[in-house]
Image (tube, rainbow, N blue to C red):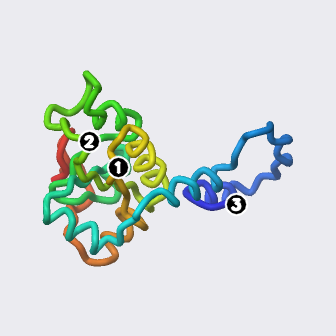
Amino acid sequence: MTGPAAAGTAAAGTAEAPPAARPPGARTIDEILAAARARLHRLTPAEAFAEFVRGAVLVDIRPQAQRAREGGIPGAVIVERNVLEWRFDPASDARLPWVRDYGEQVIVFCSEGYTSSLAAAALQDLGLASATDIAGGFVAWAADGLPVCPPGPGSTAERAC
């Protein structure tokens, strides 16, 4: 098991029943993640920063509690994962007012770069062909010494610090 849930499963210390037989056509989350990442040109934090400086949109999809605990990236647009596709689909009535172009360069990030890969692939499915994510997510960005907002309630509902 990989990803954010891997540590939580072992930490729980409970015996688990073996998984049920997988239905035909079903894929594991590891398979889904690998397929999503195969479509992306994932960026290192330094590459993402350079693209952001050139005008790419950084999108923080982490929940508010996680942003408050970890901090944020100055200037990132906050769009939580559960509404991402509606806010970035140029054809959606619920899109952000400035989202009008399928050529918008969108760089999604989460905490460690798992959920963001799935989210970037979903944006590609909407036609945003250059959508991608940050390998390692916010944790890698901060570890590389790139600009961050400190943890706490400093982010607004729409823009980080």
Percent position of residue 153, x then y: 23, 48
In the picture, the disc for residue 102 is 2
- What amino acid is at disc 3? Ala
- Residue extending furthest toward the top: 93
Drawn side of residue 38 relative to residue 119, left or right: right
Percent position of residue 118, x then y: 48, 49
Task: Choose mark 2 or mark 3, whichever is in front.
Answer: 2
Percent position of residue 16, x then y: 81, 49
Near mark 2 (Cα within 10 A), the count class, few <14, some 14-19 or many ≥20, is some
Residue 122 occupies which quadrant of the picture? Answer: top left
78 to 73, vertically: above or below: above
Near mark 1 (Cα within 10 A), the count class, few <14, some 14-19 or many ≥20, is some
- How far apart marks 2 and 3 lie (CA) works out to 42 Å
State yes or no: discs 2 and 3 in contact (Cβ < 8 Å): no
State yes or no: discs 2 and 1 in contact (Cβ < 8 Å): yes
* Label 3 or label 1, whichever comes before in sequence order: 3
Q: Which residue bears the numbered disc 3?
A: 10
- Residue extending furthest toward the bottom: 144
- What amino acid is at disc 2? Tyr
- How far apart marks 2 and 1 lie (CA) works out to 7 Å
85 to 145, vertically: above or below: above
SS class, disc 2: loop
SS class, disc 3: helix
Q: Which residue bears the numbered disc 1?
A: 129
Task: Choose mark 3 or mark 1, whichever is in front.
Answer: 1
In the picture, the disc for residue 4 is none
Quarter of the image that includes the N terminus: bottom right
Near mark 3 (Cα within 10 A), the count class, few <14, some 14-19 or many ≥20, is few
- What amino acid is at disc 1? Ala
